[in-house]
Amino acid sequence: MSKPFDLLNLYARFSRERKISVTAPQTAQEFLAAIGAQLDKALTDDILIAGQRTAAMFEAMVVALGHYKLMKVEDTGRVYPVGRYRAPDFRIVLEDDEQWLVEVKNVYEADPVRQERQIRTPSYLSSLDSYARATRAALKVAVYWARWGIWTLVSRTICWMKMATSSST
């Protein structure tokens, strides 16, 4: 079994935000109470659950298809400067060494003829794009169209064109 680095990082952040020592006896009890409450809240957040499920489906699909050198969950950990960059969900290094950063989204349209939807705001996409430029990787958006059970993968340019169209109407 691997060491619980993610859990320890979460615990350290908890104690840092509250300005309490990680070794103080009450810190662990406060941490457990706080994460228990957060877990209860997360388990009732249908959008969060659907998003996590969709990201796991994308990850499984890429692994099953193969034809990549490396795939990594990218959106964990801290990114500085805060607010300027947003890490997308995954980094994929292709067999030809091209690197993609992929933001995964789940879209369910109740009306089957309405397929145009603003997935995120311009500032959200801009922070993803800034991260991609800083890491010199191509930004892609993978959309799972839940109503139809299909995936699309588009470049950031298409997302920006849609955003410009949606903003002007």
Image: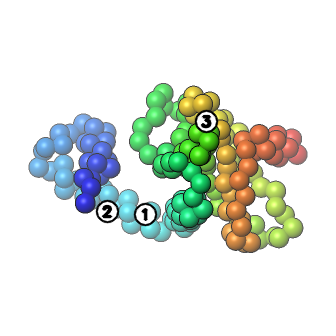
Q: Is residue 47 visible?
A: no
Callout 1 environment at 10 Å: few (<14), some (14 to 19), or many (20+)? few
Residue 58, percent from left and from top:
58, 60
C-alpha separation, residue under disc 3 versus residue under disc 2: 37 Å
Colour approach in the figure: rainbow
Q: Left of 63 or right of it: where is 113?
A: right
116 to 16, vertically: above or below: below
The three-letter code of the residue at mark 2 reads: Gly
Residue pointed to by mark 2: 36
Residue pointed to by mark 3: 137
Residue 36, percent from left and from top:
31, 62
Residue 33, percent from left and from top:
26, 59
Q: Residue at x 62, y 42 (%)?
A: 96
First-in-chain label (3 vs 2): 2
Q: Residue at x 67, y 46 (%)?
A: 140
Tell which tag, 3 or 2, sits nearer the viewer.
Answer: 3
Q: Which quadrant holds residue 14?
A: top left
